[in-house]
Amino acid sequence: MKELEKITPLELDFARWYTDVVKQGNLIEYGPVKGTMIFKPNSFGIWEQIQKALNGIFNSLKIQNVYLPLFIPDRLLAKEKEHIAGFNPELATITKVGDKDLEQKIYVRPTSEVLFADLFKKMIVSHKDLPILYNQWANVVRWEKTTNPFLRNREFLWQEGHTCHKSAIEARKLTRDMINVYAKFLKNYLAIPTIIGKKTPYEKFAGACSTYTVEAMMKDGKALQAGTSHYLAQNFSKKFEISFKNDKNEDEFVYQTSWGVSTRLLGAIIMTHGDNRGIIIPPKVAPVQVDILELFANKQPRVHDFCQELVKQLERKFRVRLDSTDKSPGYKASNSEIQGVPLRIEVGPKDLENKTVTIVRRDTLEKTIVDISEVKSKVRELLAQIHNNLYENAKKKLDENTVLVDNYEEFKEKIKENKFVLAPFCCAEEAEKQIKDETGATTRCIPRKNLKPGKSNKCIFEGCRSQTNKYVIFAKAY
Amino acid sequence: MKELEKITPLELDFARWYTDVVKQGNLIEYGPVKGTMIFKPNSFGIWEQIQKALNGIFNSLKIQNVYLPLFIPDRLLAKEKEHIAGFNPELATITKVGDKDLEQKIYVRPTSEVLFADLFKKMIVSHKDLPILYNQWANVVRWEKTTNPFLRNREFLWQEGHTCHKSAIEARKLTRDMINVYAKFLKNYLAIPTIIGKKTPYEKFAGACSTYTVEAMMKDGKALQAGTSHYLAQNFSKKFEISFKNDKNEDEFVYQTSWGVSTRLLGAIIMTHGDNRGIIIPPKVAPVQVDILELFANKQPRVHDFCQELVKQLERKFRVRLDSTDKSPGYKASNSEIQGVPLRIEVGPKDLENKTVTIVRRDTLEKTIVDISEVKSKVRELLAQIHNNLYENAKKKLDENTVLVDNYEEFKEKIKENKFVLAPFCCAEEAEKQIKDETGATTRCIPRKNLKPGKSNKCIFEGCRSQTNKYVIFAKAY
């Protein structure tokens, strides 16, 4: 129980709670270069499950995995001015190899649009080569000033999809399809509800024509951008000369998209589902779904045999771990809880007598005594229930804390309360900056569907108040 | 057939043959920074199968996956002088972020021993924390002067295992176990026979106490180091102060190992099994195991329906791809061959009439006409036969071209003929360097078992001729 006490209650100090959960869940260690981190088995295992699930989805959509280099030469990045400007202050730059200076600077990729563009230029000749649907799993580097485990690191892991199409319509459709893929994935695998929408011009990706996003609400009410999908139009294809012969045998530039999710998702899982006992991992991506705790086996060796039998029974269908150490029952339970394992099964000498086991849910801490013959079906049922319960709680939180306002006073108040604030907004860059300065809120997205019909359509910003048909979600964000 | 003609015959010019195979098989594209490369779906798919197979093996050995940072700060690498000296001229160095100079240089990892050492120091307290068995899949960077796709690149992909143990015996055992894991994996998955042995002191890993290797023979007779396993003893633990309380409650430094295989394995596959039609991918790691070629479907639309039915039947058990484009039968067959797909099934209107299909093996080009009802079992049988055939051919090549010599004249002659030359050798560093200068051969390993009993035990090196009980394999190498 000692370790549990180290977690600061989330009501008391959310930031400290987060750091405690990360550390106590044995999820990470800090790296030796400031702002970098080490994924220990408990967190990397979640990322591997996320990779597996997304690879399955990508594969069904005929998206192929590739791997492009870590390094971008100076001349390549310089080709797209808006894009490089968006990343420049964060670019890690290699200038030396051994003791020798390089003639040309080399950047460590912050994202790979220009590398893919350079590849596509070499590959594409005719409309028959299109579409190209590529994805890569990679590490990327952005030298952020302030960092936070999973949420903002100088190196992080992600997948980045890059596609080329023969028409704007097809590329636009894929951009929207992918944001829907992410929203569904977040709901079905991570139990995280999101709001799908478009970024304002000020918040869109550097070099994109439009950016779609899925925005999730964390337990403290702040927003987390959980995935993005960009319609790049012909911005890169014109600058990198990625052209194809269309079916009229004319030269045309390809239409492109890019889209990604990153290890931020682990931060999203913690801050959406976690409680004062630590992380709660959604069952579908939990590296361990069921902990089997052998209690007092020293007094009754048959308990051990029974537990091993149980492992055999369950491991064909579930990811199972057995704790048969000589630690105390209390320690074993706490250890399973703090690591966020969705279910634990406790087996002691008494259970053996009664031919039962005790199953404990991590989310509700509810205990169920189950007949041995029914363990398998009960585990399946409870894992599904946990997923649904996590999702429903998060959805309720999101719905209850998304509010519609029509005047700036109320806007500021609701932002202070860490709400998602839906408001009519002109989307002018200057207005957006000033609102950020005054309230700390940024625009999260223009929701695809108006969540609630607006009573007013005067821009919320006091300096504007012009008529607008756009409703935008504002929030403080990670 | 046009593309096929572009492959230089391997008997004519092996190096050009290799480059042609890589390019024509649509395996890679060169990256924009010299010495880097792009893994296209055809090659990355093989790497993904390798990852899957090895992850399965590692998992059964309780080895856990983690991810450590790309960056090593100056001060950390400087702690192990021998280790850094081994990598220094190849170290890519970050000195700037954006326009700002960094205070301390940061290196891009060439390998991660020092990063793992820094982590282990933080994690380990007692003997109860041991052993720790970690692995990571990562990109590493070594600024090589001459590069070659898959074989030697400035950035490559690999897995690196790092373990800590409470005794030298246990760590030594794991070092040997892992080299055996690699030898088995190469045989059972890649159909590549290897010679297992120990590196000479001159060839061992910088910072290791001893290095084991698996050496494979390429079709031109040259050696390729396919995997290594290092016993690090307490070299790193002493310098990084990774200590634990042993069961007598005394402080002791841990005993460590590290081991890895890399994307070199793709080069090994090409040069072990390839022929003048291109790569032949061993069935177990082929991203596509069976190509189904729809022939003349425009004349007989029922062919298309039948092929789709066939895909459904086979895809539950095998990795299947359907080519239903309107390209010619000859083109489709060549395309499947040049990409090294182990089996292709050709389906034309006649087959439909006769209720048969034609299965063609990539390795022998043998055609079998099979009744529709027997396709599934025949595919399984043929894939197993291809694996065995590839292995047997490679084994024969290796056995026939490994020769025992006892004098330097014959030694030089056999090295010139690109043989693996087994010879008594004193293992003195100076002798090794001079032999390399004179013949181009390096020591590959001291085989675990004497392959052939030596007639003489006078050192092969003319300047030495001292008595020795060591037999060493020399060869030219990649």
Image (cartoon, coloured by chain):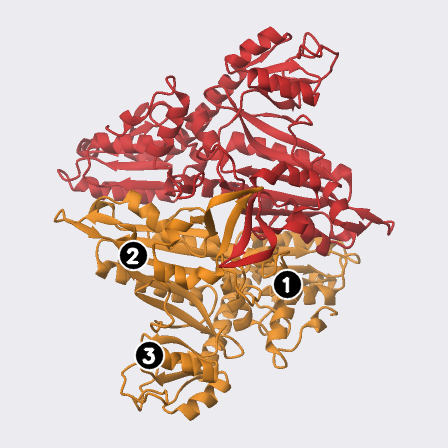
Chain colours: A red, B orange
Q: Nearer the viewer, mark 2 or mark 3?
A: 3
Q: Earlier in the sequence, mark 2 or mark 3?
A: 2
Can the viewer see residue B369? no
Identify residue for label 2. Answer: B256
Identify residue for label 1. Answer: B345
Please state the chain letter of the residue tagged with numbered disc 1 in the rendered image: B
Give the crowd class for mark 2: few <14, some 14-19, many >=20 residues within 10 Å: many
Asked if B347 appears above or below A288 in the picture, the reply is: below
- What residue type is disc 2 on? Gln
Please state the chain letter of the residue tagged with numbered disc 2 in the rendered image: B
SS at mark 2? strand
Identify residue for label 3. Answer: B427
User: Residue B269's x, y, as percent?
Assistant: 52, 67
Give the crowd class for mark 1: few <14, some 14-19, many >=20 residues within 10 Å: many
Callouts 2 and 1 in the same chain: yes
Please state the chain letter of the residue tagged with numbered disc 3 in the rendered image: B
Asked if A254 appears above or below B372 in the picture, the reply is: above
